[in-house]
Image: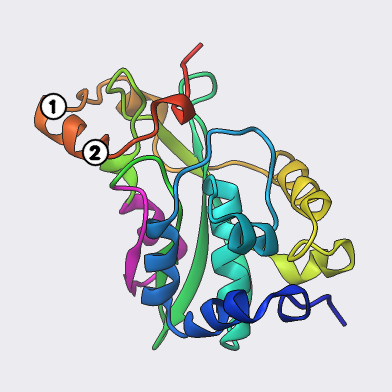
Amino acid sequence: MFDTIESHLTAEQRAMWLSLDSPAKIQAFLDSIPYSAEDANRSPLQVLQERQAHCLDGALFAAAALRRLGRSPIIVDLLPEPGLDDDHVLAIFKRDGFYGALAKSNFAGLRYREPIHRTYRELIFSYFEDFFNVNGVKTLRAYSAPVNLANFDKLGWMTRSEGVDAIEKRLKTLKRIPLLPDTLARDLLPMDQRSYQAGMLGANAAGLYKPL
């Protein structure tokens, strides 16, 4: 048995939590709160209490909210070329056999995806053009196998930041599943100015990854 979020909430927080009864409403909540530039991780409970999150916090919050709706708490890590960008974590859901995703991001194009994708790989490729760094370089190169967060229940990941820290450490050990060969990656065009500006709309400058 895992520790539930509900037992820790005020009446107002509980009402908000229970109102998140669809993937669209979960994403709308994530879009309504500020992007956190802090290195510290927040559990889903802390996200609800403090009303801020970065990408890992947001993905775990979405996974916990999807779990309350009877779905498995699954995340996938999108992996950039090392040293050029930060990774990005998605919470995955399915509808009628098709994959969609929920996410919190500092970039406008790295958030929600409709459940229209037939495979994980197809879903992840939908993020390719929007996955760029501050220099306008497209950096998505690989992804992780899906992770079922139920395997971390004993660490209390839904209510304790220490559990989230353990998940972050686990993600760093997973095998990279490549998306494209190096020969293609070398010839990618940089982001055009219009697309770059659209993707950066509303970004928290303090939370942007600085390439090495």
Picture coordinates of residue 124 (x, y %)?
A: 40, 54
Is residue 115 rendered magenta in the image? yes
**In the rendered view, would you say 197 is above or below 18?**
above
Q: CA distance from mark 1 to mark 2?
A: 14 Å
Which amino acid, by three-letter code, is at mark 1? Asp
Viewer-nearest residue: 200 or 11: 11
Which amino acid, by three-letter code, is at mark 2? Leu
Is residue 153 rendered magenta in the image? no
Between disc 1 and disc 2, whose residue precedes? 1
Residue 192 image label: 1
Q: Is residue 18 left or right of residue 23?
A: right
**In the rendered view, would you say 202 is above or below 44?**
above
Residue 172, quarter of picture: top right
Are there few (<14), some (14-19), or many (20+) residues within 10 Å of tag 2? few
Q: Which residues are magenta?
A: 109-126
- The answer to whether residue 38 is seen in the rendering is yes
- The answer to whether residue 144 is seen in the rendering is no
Picture coordinates of residue 198 (x, y %)?
A: 18, 38
Residue located at (84% from left, 77% from top): 2
Q: Is residue 171 left or right of residue 111?
A: right
Between tags 1 and 2, which lies in front? 2
Quarter of the image with the N terminus in it: bottom right
Task: Name the element at disc 2.
Answer: loop
Q: Is residue 60 left or right of residue 80?
A: right
Residue 150, quarter of picture: bottom right
Task: Name the element at disc 1.
Answer: loop
Residue located at (26% from left, 41% from top): 129
Residue at the spot of label 2:
201
